Amino acid sequence: MALDAEAGDALRATLGDLVDDSAAARDRSSHDTWPVTTKLARLGRHPYSADAVVRVASFDQVPEVLALATRLGIPVTTRALGSSVTGQPLPVGGGIVLDVSGVPATFEVNHRNMTVTATASMNGGTLEDALAASGLTLGHSPQSLYRSSVGGWLATLATGQFSSQYGGIEDLVTGYSVILATGEQVELRASPRAAMGPDLRQVFLGSEGTLGVISSVTLKVFPVQPTRLTAFSLPSVGAGLEILRDQALAGLRPLLLRLYDTDEARHAMADPGFAGPVLFAGTCGPEILADAQLEYLAGLATARGGIGLGSAPVETWMGRRFDFSAVENLLATDGGYAETIEVAHNWDGIQPLYDALKRSLAPLADEVLAHFSHVYTQGTSMYVILLGQAESDASAVERLRTIWSTAMEVCLDHGAELSHHHGGGLARSPYSRRSLGSAHVVLRRLKTALDPAGILNPGKLGL
């Protein structure tokens, strides 16, 4: 227990009804959507439990909570909508779960500057739908759009399915406010760019609540424009990777690029007999530009042996791209397990990494699926999905832990990035120092400077 009787009394005296130390509240806050904790919940096991949940009704209450926790040395783990799939919002040292999900969401659009400022607790899908009514879009579209908060996007350095055109959250955020462990409030912005010292906005992006609590966010918005969609069957994953690289070097900015290996292509195409990799592509913008980009992509695909399949497969995928049911239904069965692990590598390493992960993970699941969906001039992401059936939920938990350790060791051996957009959380924290290498000292010194009592989300990012 990080929260002794004296500290508990002080917390309740200061915060009153905001504090809930009931077993039900603590149990609920000890799980997110990481498959490991989903299975643990089915087993009635809650290893990541807080001593109390503090549900704030306004971000104005957060400075008082953090200042008190700093004075008393109580760990604080911030939680919004709990959509993390790697355990970011789960406490490892007891203390407080700071639940900001009940903070009323508001937003304001600046139509001249094409930005929107929203409460960090706001559901991303709710914001996107509100903007769509005015003909605008965030350009940020993770699969968890309707389950995640805008503050969570910054805290986990998220990216979305249309990143090839719009970029990741680091490209979309123009400013935000953050509350430090001491209770101090800081505004970080650049309008539209600033060269007054380092870009301090980068400090808290991806920090997973270890350096501060994000309270409001200003993001770019874009006009909604017509899209063009198409698909190509391909002779090999290698051919597909060359197409991704070719278009990046040509400077294209397609709305959508998703290369599926044969195993996942059967799911993407909803055709168990589909016999090869498939590339989904799309462009967006003024008709003349969108058509030209799609025509150029088609030429690249044809030159690498691709065969056009038309737009129907991509249109079908667009209609179900927020659907988690296959994974959720499997996790809801006794012994059923599923996991998603997204990594990244440069062009010279991605094919060997793909081969090694497929080979190493094959004995650990019934299906090992892979796709590449975020592309850069220097390389690409790789997203691995594992589906399987164990003897029991307890066995499934052990299998999932083995999957994680195996995948991370393979990635470290290949010099790959351990996470592309799901962040570190509990799943990757044991490997953080090896992944960041000598740069980890910078993170540790930032932690010491910004959170001197070490209260904020301990146990994450190797801290």
Image (cartoon, grey):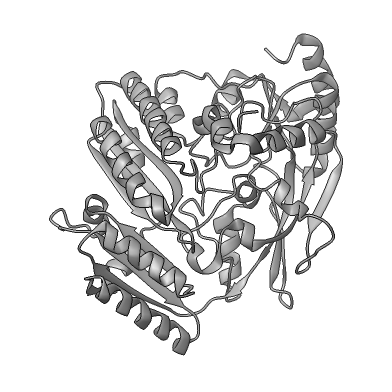
Q: Residue at x 36, y 76 (%)?
A: 297
In the rendered structure, the answer to whether residue 39 lies left or right of residue 443 reads left
Can residue 153 be seen here? The reply is yes
Residue extending furthest toward the bottom: 288
Q: Camera-side residue: 8 or 304? A: 304
Q: Camera-side residue: 390 or 130? A: 390
Q: Quadrant of residue 239?
A: bottom left
Q: Quadrant of residue 241?
A: bottom left
Residue extending furthest toward the top: 5
Q: Camera-side residue: 23 or 253? A: 253
In the rendered structure, the answer to whether residue 369 lies left or right of residue 80 reads left
Q: Is residue 201 above or below residue 139?
A: above
Can residue 87 be seen here? The reply is no
Give the quadrant of the C terminus.
top right
Residue 13 location, x and y as percent? Answer: 85, 21
Residue 285 location, x and y as percent? Answer: 50, 81
Q: Residue at x 45, y 49 (%)?
A: 344
Give the quadrant of the N terminus.
top right
Q: Is residue 429 above or below residue 374?
A: above
Residue 60 location, x and y as percent? Answer: 82, 43
Q: Residue at x 31, y 40 (%)?
A: 356
Residue 45 location, x and y as percent? Answer: 46, 18
Q: How many marks?
A: 0
